[in-house]
Amino acid sequence: MFAAAAAGISFATVGALAAYAGQAEGLHGNGSALRDFGVVKGLESSSTQDIDAATAAANPLKLATLARGLDARVLTAGNAAPNLDMMALWPVDHPTHLLACNEQGPAQSGVQRIDLATGVAETIVTGTQSCDPLHITPWGTVIFGEETTTGHVYELIDPLSVTNATLDRVTGLASTGKIVQRPALGAIAFEGLGILPNGVTYYGDELGPINGAPGGSYYKFVPSYPFAGGAPIGTLADSPYAGGSISVLKIGQGTNTGQGMAQGIATWLPMTPAPGTGSLRPGASAVRATGFYRPEDLTLDLRRLDLGDVRFCGNNTGREEARYYGEAICVTDGTLASATAGTSTPEVQILVPGSPEINMPDNIEYQPGRGNWIVHEDGDTEFVRPHNNDLWSCLDDRGDEDLQSDGCLRIASLNDLGSEWTGGFFDPTGQHFYVSIQHNKTGFGVVLDITGWR
């Protein structure tokens, strides 16, 4: 096992800063890297290194090259599950552990608990299929979901007291009463989950278009009994996810809807999960909801939420071999009160259009304090050119004439052509970025803690 010890990553020599720009701003110069992105200098290009398994296993830090000014330590490597995806710190106030989904089959670990001090991983639950999203709820529980056609969301309470629990995907039952399935959210391929303080939740279906049928839709869950705030709940029966209503996003006005209408004013249309399976796809199809190319992760705009408004941004991954590079979109949904009451008018706009440089975006994370968006690439690197997947820090739109990001900076690149960045998230300070390097050559889970933002 590689000890979770602090260590800096050496930096590749880079030339002038390379950035993807919004329509109005043009390229950022090096003088603005510190001001806008909190790093001394960005990476000029993707890494073309492809280190061998022995090198990666001996020092997992060599899996990545970071922008100048950033450092990293290995949080875990050696005994964690191999396909760690989304993660969260636990307990929220004084974290001692990292909780992580493992994106494998029911026979492998589904959710793991990783000690922050030692990097040792323990399995909390097995039985999930492609466990991907994992978050801490405002009411003090853990939710995790499955990124598969028949995926469900599950809710866990008191995660430090559960070890080696088993889960039956068919019945939805677990070997402990501290884990329950949440059929009220339906069944789809879950990845992104944006949870408002009262339990209203936004999520997408990781589905691509097939034979003319639309891709995955975006959904909104409104609990029957929203969380009113205060202390964490005492039992899972008190969770807002015990019951509620679901609606699906349809872009357009009146009869001006359908293929080609993927931005602008929209509507949330009520729908019901399919009897028996709980699938949301038949209902979305019946109301001709808007489809996207593989909606992946999404995250809330915390600055807007502090002002009482609702906005979330998410990635549609696209398909590199078809030269569709995906995009990051943002959805506004009125105020917290109107979003909950069903009186909001949602609107969808592109934040970051994809390109050969920002390619097949997967995970996305909001950086507290700075307000930037961290976009993770999950490109099929063999289809276009031999290059590694990158991390990008993207500015929000700052009120110029377009609505798109005012510039993105490459802040990290992998040195393993078969791997991807995934599950990255910030601690509340916006200074620690925990991120998984999935499918890496070591064959085991690697999580980095990246720091150094100025």
Image (cartoon, rainbow, N blue to C red):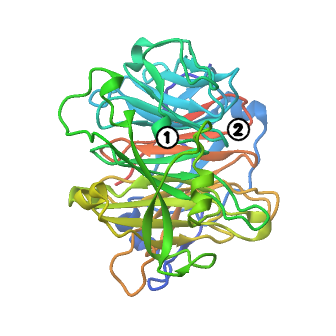
Label 1 vs label 2: CA separation?
A: 17 Å
| Residue 367 locus on image (x, y percent) | 38, 54
Dot 1: element: strand
Q: Is residue 373 above or below residue 27?
A: above
- The quadrant of the rendering that contains the C terminus is bottom left
Q: Residue at x 52, y 70 (%)?
A: 352
- Label of residue 72 in the image: 1
Dot 2: element: loop
| Residue 351 locus on image (x, y percent) | 48, 71
- Compared across the picture, whether 385 is left or right of 116 comes to right
Q: Is residue 265 above or below residue 374?
A: below
How many numbered marks, from 0 up?
2
Residue where numbered disc 2 is placed: 440
Q: Identity of the amino acid at label 1?
A: Ala
Q: Quadrant of residue 122?
A: top right
Q: Is residue 17 above or below residue 233?
A: below
Q: Identity of the amino acid at label 2?
A: Asn
Give the mark nearer the N terminus: 1 vs 2: 1
Nearer the observer, disc 1 or disc 2? 2
